[in-house]
Amino acid sequence: MVTHVVLFKLLDRRPESVEKTRAVLASLAGKIPQLRHFEVGADVLHTDRSYDLALVAKFDNLEDLNAYQIHPLHQEVVKYLLSVRQSIVAVDYEGS
């Protein structure tokens, strides 16, 4: 199992902007066959070190993660994210 974790800090951090971006990310759920688990959540603490959104996705293997990365629906979301993000960080790890 491969877990893909991505954190997003937005240029516009107002609640409505965060919610719109959360909805864009969440629109991928159930639409890409390689996704075994998919969740998106908005930060609730709003501290200086907080990012605005987190995405957690799980895949059976690295090949499925790579297929997700190049999937046309994911690429559409990436284009949107590049226009609204201040920063994005990610970690991908293998485990159960």
Image: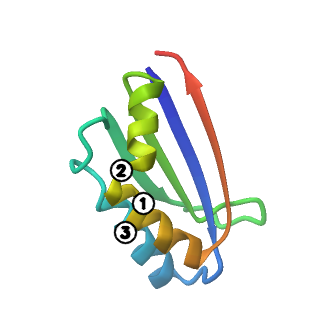
Neighbour class for label 3 at 10 Å: few (<14), some, many (≥20)?
Answer: some
The foreground one among 48 and 25 is 25
Circle 2 sits in a helix, a strand or a loop, which is it?
A: loop
Q: Do the residues labelled 1 and 3 touch (CB within 8 Å)?
A: no
Q: Which residue lies furthest to the top in this view?
A: 96
- How far apart in space, not on screen, are marks 3 and 2 (Cα)? 15 Å
Label at residue 6 = none
What residue lies at 45% left-to-right and 72% top-to-bottom?
21
Q: Which residue type carries mark 1? A: Gln
Residue, x 65% and y 61% (percent of image)? 51
Query: Marks 3 and 2: which is nearer the front?
Result: 2
Task: Give the mark nearer the N terminus: 3 vs 2.
Answer: 3
Determine the secondary structure under disc 1: helix
Q: Residues within 10 Å of mark 1 (few under 14, many from 20)?
A: few
User: Residue 96's x, y, as percent?
Assistant: 46, 15
Q: Are marks 2 and 1 in contact (CB under 8 Å)?
A: yes
Q: Nearer the viewer, residue 68 or 51?
A: 68
User: Which part of the image, by quadrant, shows the N terminus?
Assistant: top left
- Write down the residue under mark 2: 71
Relative vertical location of residue 96 with respect to residue 59 in this rendering, above or below:
above
Pointer 1: what residue? Answer: 75
**Pointer 3: what residue?**
24
Indicate whether 52 appears above or below 3: below
- Kind of residue at badge 3: Val
Q: Callout 2, which amino acid?
A: His
Q: What element carries label 3?
A: helix
Q: Is residue 83 left or right of residue 80?
A: right
User: Which circle, 1 or 3, is nearer the viewer?
Assistant: 1
